[in-house]
Image: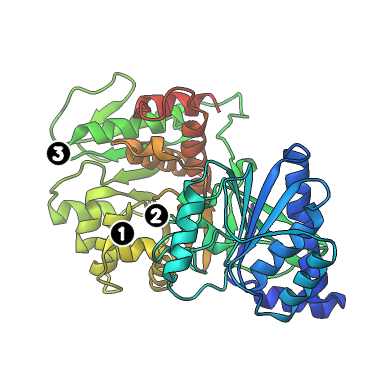
Amino acid sequence: MKKIFDEVRSLDKKAIENYFLSEDILMEHASIGIQKYITKKFKKNEKILIVSGTGNNGADGIALARLLHKRFDVSLYLTNEPKTEIGKLQLKRAKSINVNFVKDIFQADIIVDCIFGTGLNKELDKNSIDLIEKLNNFKSFKIACDIPSGLDILGRVTTIAFKANVTITMGVLKTALFSDVAKDYVGKIKVTKLGIEDEFFQSTLTNKYLLEKSDLVLPYRNIENSHKGTYGHLNVISGEKVGASIISSMAAFSFGAGLVTIISENQKSIPHLIMQDKVISKNCTAIAIGMGLGKIDDSKLENILKLKLPKVLDADIFYNKLILEYLNEYVVLTPHPKEFISLLKLANIADITIEELQNNRFKYVKEFCNKYPYVVLLLKGSNVIIAQDDNIYINSFGNSSLSKGGSGDVLSGLIASLLAQGYKRVEGCISASLAHTLSALNYSKNNYSLTPDDLIEGIKNL
């Protein structure tokens, strides 16, 4: 996994002090990083339009124009004269080698957005909105420098933002790039080095981490002398909608659980691989509850929540205030945004809309986990957030094919399966979440056609 940082100005300052560097040197390395990417990816003499603003992000763009000047057909458009001293210096350098300045934008092969950086803290004016809208409409390959213009430091869009194919960010990954809102704007995210050794950033403390494919730990079976009980017994509590319980159970069974039993007072027709009972199994090693649960008697729910077994709580259960008494070291919560809003309200943390949550996901996750530090929270979304206490892990592999009924039931089943097999809660959530999203990512048919069964089949082949 990779470190993610909320704020980078203090990092830049620390790097300048520790390595006796200057802002100019850091900027040169940042621009060289983008230059290398463009030189490697595109043919010589392709047309490049660099659009630069008045701040340091714009200065990066002016420096980039100078570096690309001889190899490509480069045009530099300034939204206005640079306001920073380093921007003015970069402009002098660009003019000294006759970089081509243009008075209007046009559709080039490549457009590089250097209008606004992470310091954007106000709504865009009409000229900026019109400019970004025109750039978005061009059928060019679009690169954002550090962060797409229009995204603020929290990854929010107030009016409009530049839609990049690639965002090349400077030095380190930034939290703003991983908001759910940002996902439609950042494209692929690449990090360019600033001439500073990686150890500098690795030794800097942070509480946010980006998950990588290599963080997936599959439940391989390395013990030959074993039996079904060796790999855990998951109980899935069924309610009004047994279909959700069946999906979760099949996902769990396909992800290594030795035994899976659906617990239901009303016996239903279920797949032959899954057992069925009316009471919790004596050898149960984990519980999943909430998927299609509907209404449940409080005393029955309380008896389940009291059990000192790993539990995955999902879906309907987030509308029942009773769960607040049992948010302890045994629990994993897997809400989608609407359910998390209900949970925040029940816990007297916040009474907000979905839009407010989506604009401040990390903030509300932090507030919830500060109040319930023993709970492991997995907040679903286009970028999945896994959190416990102060630590946050982000899974950015999700895509729109997962926007289907039953996808969340699969995920809950995967997590519960790993808990039943003895995984720790955070590690179980990380591996289950990665398996879930990577299965969708590997799906080769049209993205609108993915079903829970396809997801489960893909997980078998990871």
Give the crowd class for mark 1: few <14, some 14-19, many >=20 residues within 10 Å.
many
| Outermost residue, top side | 272
Q: Which mark is residue 340?
A: 1
Residue 89 found in image quarter: bottom right
Residue 83: tell me if it is visible: yes
Label located before the other in sequence (2 or 3):
3
Is label 1 in a helix, a strand or a loop?
helix
Label located before the other in sequence (1 or 3):
3
Q: Residue at x 48, y 41 (%)?
A: 432
Return the x and y of residue 342 as percentages of the image width and height. 24, 62
Q: Residue at x 19, y 22 (%)?
A: 269
| 222 lies left or right of 285 | right
Circles 2 and 1 in contact, beta carbons < 8 Å:
yes
Return the x and y of residue 221 as percentages of the image width and height. 58, 29
Instruction: Say which of 159 and 319 sits in front.
Output: 159
Circles 2 and 3 in contact, beta carbons < 8 Å:
no
Residue 183: tell me if it is visible: no
Label 3 sits on residue: 240
Label 2 sits on residue: 379
| Outermost residue, front side | 103
The amino acid type of the residue labelled 1 equals Phe
Is label 3 in a helix, a strand or a loop?
loop
Return the x and y of residue 25 as percentages of the image width and height. 83, 70
| 49 lies left or right of 260 | right
Residue 92 found in image quarter: bottom right
Q: Nearer the viewer, mark 1 or mark 3?
A: 1
Measure the C-alpha gap from mark 1 to mark 3. 21 Å
